[in-house]
């Protein structure tokens, strides 16, 4: 059914075809349907065929006048980073709505009633998976939607948390090569749902993958400016494990020692241990994050006698006007800070 709809949509955009079909069908139908035909007329069978073609044309025109916007795929992305990837792959071929916007925390998100309405109308939902959007199952069920759910991290080599091998680290997008997989997963899902735009999706994905490959090379070149023994990170929460694994950094610790910002505040013992590690490793800065509470990082930095570094973009893009409006900008922003502070 969706394929038929998309086929109709394709022809709708071909204005010349529609005009030609209208003229042809009206002429055929008027000439033969109104005036009528007689078996004894010369060329009866040829005229009868023309009439049938005319009527078929009118039937076709009836469907092609369906408004184009009614056929646009309605997509939902769970948070800003995924939404940017979907925009690069899909362009303007879909209507996209984002649940957790810029500077907002996808870990701790509390859905609002409007989210249920948006999801109920969606054809497809793009989510990170790996237990990041733990609030989505309930929202999905409550909305009654039939939207297809696509886990865009499918196929990545999942990092588990050091002290808990059962806990998956959801921040796979921090390794640029993983985002190439994300983009391909998004493209594959859109091609299944909207095969008419297959060429467009595939071309846009190819172009985006090239940009991501270039970004991966740029990150490697920038990181090479920092000596290996100085590639040590302390962040607000444990969000950069994939980044560290790909680009040769060591995660010294996190103010909130968890891959989720929902974890309880660190105990006195955990804080004391982290302070000890920071001092032993000559850590120069604790990096804060755009979507996290600064208070704990500020307290720890005072006790450790190190600065709170500039804000990183980890789990959310920045607002319009920031230098992290896209995923690529976000990674560049973070890497420039690391080079500046750790070199
Ligand atoms: Zn996170």
Image: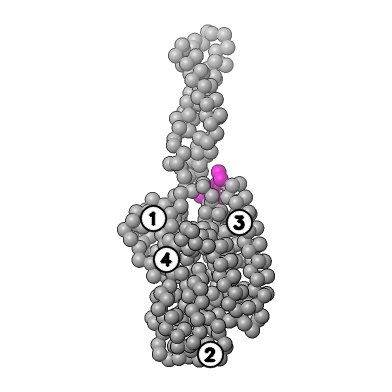
Q: Secondary structure at mark 3?
A: helix
Quadrant occupied by the C terminus: bottom right
As drawn, the label of residue 119 is 1
Q: Nearer the viewer, mark 2 or mark 3?
A: 2
Label 2 sits on residue: 279
Q: Name which of mark 4 and mark 3 comes first in the sequence.
A: 4
Calculate the distance from the C-alpha at mark 2 to the C-alpha at mark 3: 41 Å
Discs 2/4, front:
2
Q: Which residue is mark 4?
A: 104
* C-alpha separation, residue under disc 1 versus residue under disc 4: 19 Å
SS class, disc 1: helix
Between the C-alphas of marks 2 and 1, the distance is 48 Å
Mark 3: few, some, or many residues within 10 Å (few <14, many ≥20)? some
Give percent across and percent down for residue 226.
65, 77
Q: Is residue 184 visible?
A: yes
Q: Toward which corner of the image does residue 188 lie, by quadrant?
A: bottom right
**Residue 66, x across and y down, in percent:** 44, 35
Check if residue 152 falls in the magenta segment: no
Q: Is residue 320 above or below residue 92?
A: below
* Disc number lying in front (4 or 3): 4
Mark 2, Cα crowd under 10 Å, few <14 / some 14-19 / many 20+, is: few
Read off the magenta span. Answer: 191-197
Numbered badge on residue 263: none
Please name the residue shown 57% across and 87% down the image.
282
Residue shown at 42% from the left, 76% from the top? 294
Left or right of 194? Residue 261 is left
Q: Choose between 41 and 173: the one closer to the eye.
A: 173
Mark 3 or mark 1: which comes first in sequence? 1
């Amino acid at each position: 059914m969706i394929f038929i709809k998309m086929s109709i949509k394709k022809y709708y955009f071909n204005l010349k075809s529609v005009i030609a079909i209208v003229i042809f069908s009206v002429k055929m139908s008027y000439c033969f349907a109104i005036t009528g035909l007689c078996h004894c007329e010369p060329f009866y069978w040829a005229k009868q065929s023309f009439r049938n073609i005319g009527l078929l044309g009118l039937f076709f025109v009836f469907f092609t006048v369906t408004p184009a916007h009614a056929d646009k795929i309605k997509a939902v992305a769970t948070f800003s980073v995924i939404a940017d990837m979907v925009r690069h792959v899909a362009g303007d071929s879909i209507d996209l709505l984002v649940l957790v916007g810029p500077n907002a925390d996808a870990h701790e998100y509390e859905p609002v009633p409007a989210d249920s309405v948006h999801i109920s109308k969606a054809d497809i939902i793009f989510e990170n998976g790996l237990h990041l959007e733990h609030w989505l199952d309930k929202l999905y069920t409550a909305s009654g939607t039939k939207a297809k759910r696509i886990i865009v991290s499918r196929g990545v080599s999942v990092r588990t948390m050091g002290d808990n091998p059962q806990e998956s680290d959801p921040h796979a997008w921090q390794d640029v090569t993983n985002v190439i997989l994300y983009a391909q997963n998004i493209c594959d899902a859109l091609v299944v749902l909207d095969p008419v735009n297959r060429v467009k999706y595939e071309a846009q994905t190819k172009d985006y993958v090239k940009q991501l490959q270039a970004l991966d090379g740029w990150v490697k070149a920038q990181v090479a400016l920092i000596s290996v023994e100085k590639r040590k990170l302390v962040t607000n929460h444990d969000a950069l494990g994939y980044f560290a694994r790909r680009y040769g950094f060591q995660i010294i610790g996190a103010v909130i020692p968890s891959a989720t910002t929902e974890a309880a505040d660190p105990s006195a013992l955990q804080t004391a241990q982290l302070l000890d590690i920071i001092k032993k490793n000559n850590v120069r800065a604790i990096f804060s994050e755009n979507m996290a509470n600064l208070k704990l990082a500020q307290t720890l930095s005072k006790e450790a006698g190190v600065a709170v570094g500039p804000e990183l973009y980890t789990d959310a893009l920045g607002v319009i006007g920031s230098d992290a409006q896209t995923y690529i900008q976000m990674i560049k922003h973070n890497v420039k800070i690391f080079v500046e502070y750790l070199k």
